[in-house]
Image (spheres, rainbow, N blue to C red):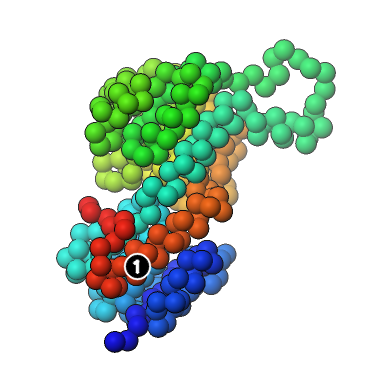
Amino acid sequence: MALPSVYLTRRIPHRAMQALRASCGSVKVWDEEDRPVPREVLLREAAQVDGLLVMLTERVDTDLLAAAPNLKAISTMSVGYDHIDIAACKARGIAVGHTPDVLTDATADHAFALLLTAARRIPEGERYVRGGEWGPWKPDLLLGQQVSGATLGILGFGRIGQGVAARAKGFNMRLLVSGGRNVAAAATAYGAQDVGLETLLEESDFISVHVPLSTETYHLIGKRELSMMKKTAILINTARGGVIDHQALYDALKGGAIAAAALDVTEPEPINPDHPLLTLDNCLIVPHIASATYQTRERMGLLAVDNLLAALNHEPLPAEVEA
């Protein structure tokens, strides 16, 4: 029997690539790292292969599936799968894998790093020194928000949200949580209070977002929600950019409705270099690097490959999307 052919929309870690090449007859990779694979190239390549390994930047929809009659398996090197039409894949009998769990710790670390960085105004302090402004010590220089003992609201209490809660316990933070499967039981396990969205917004000093992007969560945080937060509140997003209305966030930050925001994700990605959020000192934006550790990216690559090979061999996937 002929070995399967696969197409990758990005280079993946070396060990994962070796595993894939050892089990496939043909492995092609989009190798231009400075831009995502063009749509027309993806459609052309998908038409010729049995399996696809994609990133968040690729849209897998009915048009792509129609162009790929031989496609049997799709694997995304991400936890989220909002870029894939899961129902259409299931209707075609195409198994879809993703990479949960392996990036939980790295993302939770990063979310808490953003929280601390924004709370203590680290980027502003660094720019202050580089700009030659450092003068005599002053009691009111770059005052930030206290983290220890503060109230942290976690919106979306799944694996990553729970990871953030575990880190917050070391700072003796009061925990409010909302949303997620079996949230009440998980809240009890972490000593958190399961509350409604409005209570979480009104009472939290820090709000960390961990919900998946869907029609229900698109712009979940908008003008109304931002107006309910404390003026001293700091908003952190390591989930998906579309969960927050960026124009409303800019208005809230510019007008002092909330103190600061720290974003690992934006809408769109990459964010336009002239976006008004980038003009604000109280908005920290980094380029979707929550899972960017050597160890985590290797695990993600290996799991993505394991999912793809299992699907191509008609075996159970280690991490199949069930939605």
Residue 297 on image: x %, y % = 50, 55
Q: Is residue 271 above or below residue 179?
A: below
Element marked by disc 1: helix
Q: Which residue is mark 1?
A: 308
Residue 127 image-quadrant placement: top right
- What residue is rendered at 44% in x and 48% in y? 103
The residue lying toward the viewer, choosing from 310 and 321, is: 310
Q: Is residue 31 above or below residue 271?
A: below
- What residue is rendered at 35% in x and 22% in y? 192
Residue 108 on image: x %, y % = 47, 38
The residue lying toward the viewer, choosing from 202 and 252, is: 202
Residue farthest to the top, as pictured? 139
Residue 14 on image: x %, y % = 54, 67
Mark 1: few/some/many CA within 10 Å (<14, 14-19, 20+): many
Q: Is residue 271 above or below residue 181?
A: below
The residue lying toward the viewer, choosing from 170 and 139, is: 170
Q: Is residue 315 left or right of residue 175?
A: left
Q: Amino acid at mark 1?
A: Leu
Residue 34 image-quadrant placement: bottom right
Q: Is residue 120 visible?
A: yes
- What residue is rendered at 37% in x and 64% in y? 306
Q: Is residue 241 visible?
A: no
Residue 137 on image: x %, y % = 79, 17
